[in-house]
């Protein structure tokens, strides 16, 4: 089978590999789509021990098994299914998670992968294959962060830093989850225009005025993280989703020190929220579809990923079988 290897220093090699065989409790999945994600940029720079790619929709390849032919999404954290967190539905908080699909074990930039059966989510029949991967990070991660924020504030003005796929997912989900007044800070004109078309007021970096009940940092840039602490209103909540491996030093200036507020870090989403996330996709399917701006074969991944890093593409997908929509 064909698979991508991230060699580091922004080099990707398309190579032949052996079709994987499932282990105990696993099923093989033939990949239909695997969306690109900015968190993979770390592997693009440093290299990866396994095949990357973690926003995966595919078809179960298990002849004779009840789920053979089922269209599924791959849930990233490999959870145990038996601990207190898993029984409660907080599968993303399982204390036994050591592997993430596409990180510590092979992912979806390959024609097939093997996944624990409990990590496979059936895709509803009315969800198009092209949009299914958005139910993972773009909708799942965004909506979970908003639900956490609502434990502190029920609604009000919201501010989003970053209009990549996650930030735009936040803009759309915020409107459905009690935050109709939204502003967005995004330096890239193309992304800023999409956020505005989705109903967010565009703000220039460093030009935020006033304070917001809920602030969501989805860029991973330290300047945005620091500004988020200034922008959150008293008794509001600042939620951090963006990723960076560089240490972030907080300068606790007076406007931060003399303010009661909550700070949250949000990671992925629990399986218990999946049905509600499907409802979000159904409610705004046309707008979510605008995020998927290119589909291409695996052989084109090196060129497409370079364009993705340059900001030319928003949510491109590797399409192994473009006939299946």
Image (tube, helix red, strand yellow):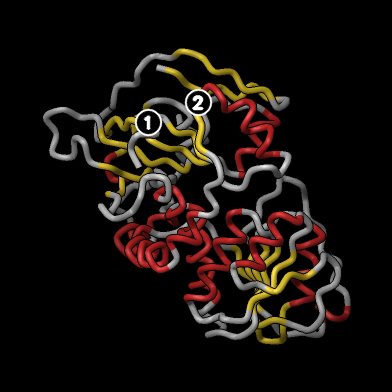
Q: Quadrant of the image for the N terminus?
A: top left
Q: Is residue 283 above or below residue 320?
A: below
Image location of residue 74, percent across then percent down: 38, 43
Q: Is residue 27 left or right of residue 131?
A: left
In the rendering, at what x and y percent does residue 247 appear?
Answer: 77, 50
Which x, y percent locates residue 140? 46, 59
Residue 99 visible in the shown view: no
Of tags 1 and 2, the one toward the viewer is: 1
* Residue drawn at the location 61% of the way across and 47% of the way down: 314
> Which of the two labelled residues, at mark 1 and mark 2, occupies the earlier sequence position?
2
Q: Position of residue 231 (x, y in %)?
A: 76, 76
Using the image as rendered, state which of residue 226 and residue 300 is in the foreground: 300
Q: Is residue 261 left or right of residue 269?
A: right
What residue is drawn where x is 59% and y is 18%? 13
Q: Which mark is residue 170?
A: none
> Which residue is label 2 attached to?
298
Q: Secondary structure at mark 1?
A: loop
Q: Quadrant of the C terminus?
A: top left
Mark 2 nearby-residue class (10 Å; few <14, some 14–19, many ≥20)? many
Query: Quick one: 194 or 269, which is closer to the camera?
Result: 194
Lateral position of residue 94 relative to residue 103, left or right? left
User: Dot 1 corresponds to which residue?
Assistant: 321
Quarter of the figure with residue 211 = bottom right
- Seen in the picture, residue 209 relative to 268 is either above or below; the reply is below
Q: Going 27% across and 49% down the picture, which residue do you hit?
A: 122
């Amino acid at each position: 089978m064909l698979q991508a290897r991230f060699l580091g220093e922004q080099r990707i090699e398309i190579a032949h590999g052996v079709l994987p065989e499932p282990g105990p409790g696993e099923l093989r999945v033939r990949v239909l789509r695997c969306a690109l994600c900015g968190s993979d940029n770390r592997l693009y720079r440093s290299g990866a021990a396994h095949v990357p790619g973690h926003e995966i929709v595919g078809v179960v390849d298990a002849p004779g098994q009840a789920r053979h032919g089922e269209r599924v999404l791959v849930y990233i954290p490999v959870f145990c299914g038996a601990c207190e967190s898993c029984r409660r539905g907080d599968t993303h908080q399982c204390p036994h998670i050591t592997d993430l699909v596409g990180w510590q074990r092979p992912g979806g930039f390959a024609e097939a992968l093997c996944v624990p059966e409990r990590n496979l989510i059936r895709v509803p029949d009315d969800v198009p294959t092209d949009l299914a991967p958005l139910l993972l990070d773009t909708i799942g991660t965004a909506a979970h962060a908003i639900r956490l924020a609502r434990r502190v504030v029920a609604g009000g003005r919201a501010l989003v830093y970053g209009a990549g796929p996650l930030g735009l997912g936040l803009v759309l989900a915020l409107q459905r989850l009690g935050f109709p007044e939204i502003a967005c800070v995004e330096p890239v004109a193309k992304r800023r225009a999409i956020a505005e078309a989705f109903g967010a007021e565009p703000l220039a970096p460093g030009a935020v005025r006033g304070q917001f009940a809920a602030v969501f940092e989805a860029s991973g840039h330290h300047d945005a993280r620091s500004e988020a602490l200034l922008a959150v209103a008293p008794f509001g909540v600042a939620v951090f989703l963006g990723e960076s491996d560089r240490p972030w030093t907080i300068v606790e200036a007076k406007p931060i020190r003399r303010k009661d507020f909550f700070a949250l870090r949000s990671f992925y989403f629990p399986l218990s929220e999946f049905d509600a996330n499907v409802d979000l996709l159904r409610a705004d399917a046309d707008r979510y579809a605008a995020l998927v701006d290119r589909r291409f074969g695996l052989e084109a991944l090196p060129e497409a990923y370079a364009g993705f890093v340059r900001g030319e593409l928003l949510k491109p997908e590797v399409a192994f079988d473009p006939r299946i929509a």
